[in-house]
Image: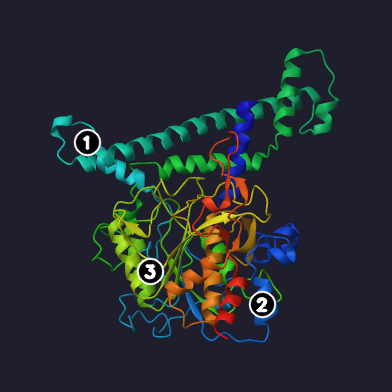
Amino acid sequence: MKNLLILSLLIVSYVLYSQDDEAGRKDLSLFNKKNINWHNKDYKKDKIVGSSVERLYKEYLKNLKPKKSIIVAIIDGGVDIYHEDLKDNIWINTDEIPNNGIDDDNNGYIDDINGWNFIGNKKGENLDKAPLEKTRMYGVLDKKYSNISQSEITDKKEYALYLKVKDSFEKDYQKDIQEANSLGQFLQNINMAEDYIKQYLQKDSFTNEDLKAIKTEDADLNSVIEFLTNVYSSGYDKKELKSYKSHIDNELKYNLNIDFHPRADIIGDDCNNYEQTDYGNNNVKGPSSSHGTFGAGVIAAKRNNGIGVQGVADSVKLMVLRVVPDGDEYDKDVALSIKYAVDNGANIINMSFGKDFSVNPHKVWEAVKYASDHNVLLVHAAGNEAENNDTIVHYPTDFVDNTDTVVNYITVGASDMKRNKNLPADFSNYGKTTVDVFAPGYELVSTAPENTYSLASGTSFSTPLVSGVAALIWSYYPELTATQLKKVLLDNVTYFGKRKVYLPLDGYGKRTKVKFGDLSVSGGVINAYKTYVYLLNKNK
């Protein structure tokens, strides 16, 4: 039973905190009503710890027009720009003539009408799956260090990195192998047990009632009945089990496979040559756009159009930059996409991605600094590992070598809807000095590809909520600098700093209580209403 419980928890974690490519739902009535738009509600008015967006619209913005349209660049795995609830809010590069095969605006990208796909080629092919960064680094460093003696090592720093990468890679690999074997055996045992019952009942299928009705002295049969009863009572779902098994198999085949090199075959560039920029295509949707489409809807799903969900910002255009495959993004693509966003007018860059290792962190940081120096606000997901970002680095970062930092950078954790001990989502990363603010990120409903909608959790979705609030405030107060905007957002959160909450859960042990204020810089949850009212009163 213990193994069954752990397996069930792993599957639940996978289902809730990953955004997969399964078909979304066209009918919003199929979702629990409590999940729809909760993230935009107000704590005082609704007793739900949302972002207070709807209260702001209702009390102050109803008859006001924004002073400026804000461009938000979404660096992700792609966005369905044709979605019924998004298409009116997609950025259009008016300096480019569509589909004429000419770089009309001389920005280095041909026919980049809505952004750019940095993981594609000129033939229209797309990179969809990629190894993790630790896999790529391990594949290179292991060849260099696996068969040499300590006395032959000249670069101690690189060797230390190799040992760290090796340890992390091997732990992940062995974990997946063990889970794949356990889950495979578990599924086989279930199939055998069900076949046993079918044969006993002389039926092609059976119900729980059929199982409970069996009365026998046969010890083997009773063991099978007990096993299946425990399985079914644990919340067993064969579809979810198979989906989780497919997820693990996918990780082993692609993400943790040191012999998998898709970039060389599809893109063919040198991913360490940052001067080589002539690659990619203008297909910003790509083959797997669920993750990016969901985040896009949180920011900018068309408000009050009678369909779908309510985005945060009503005067925003989404620039789409496809960078993140199924696996880890490449530093080169991240750096170039940030620079593209800045050079083409983005005001805010949403980055709902991250990884444990970075092969060229300085290059990415240079791009981050370039954005900060050009008055662009960067908003980044804290991560979903229930880890302390003060002690464990998750890339990209707003610092390099623990010294140089940028100011126009907000890191976001995920919160739940109730002001109780579970306020910080149990998967969310945190950090007293490295995570700036929390925002709703648990069981949100937003846009999914092909005019559908889905439910998902993660800091990947609390992050666009902060980007949306930042865009909303900036559209009414465009005179603010990015630095001033960040400060006013963090100074006007819904503050819960002194409240005792559960530390995000790492594993399945006893929960630890901490002050919510110890989990972030601001000690609170983003609040659009408070921020706007503060600025309104300040400017009277």
59 left or right of 125 in image: right
Asked whether residue 295 is in view, the answer is: yes
Q: Mark 3: which secondary structure?
A: loop
Disc 1 and disc 2: Cα gap in Å? 59 Å
Q: Classify mark 2: residues with Cα within 10 Å, few (<14), some (14-19) or many (20+).
A: some
Ranked by sequence position, the earlier of labels 2 and 3 is 2
Q: Residue at x 72, y 18 (%)?
A: 223
In depth, the one of 263 and 463 nearer the eye is: 463
Q: Earlier in the sequence, mark 3 or mark 1?
A: 1
Disc 2, SS = helix
Label 1 residue SS: helix
Q: Pick the quarter of the image with the N terminus.
A: top right
Kindly identify which residue carries mark 3: 281
Q: Can you say whether 63 is above or below 32 in the image?
A: below
Whole-percent x and y of residue 249? 49, 40
Placement of 100 over or under 405, stated as above or below: below
Depth order, front residue of 481/134: 481
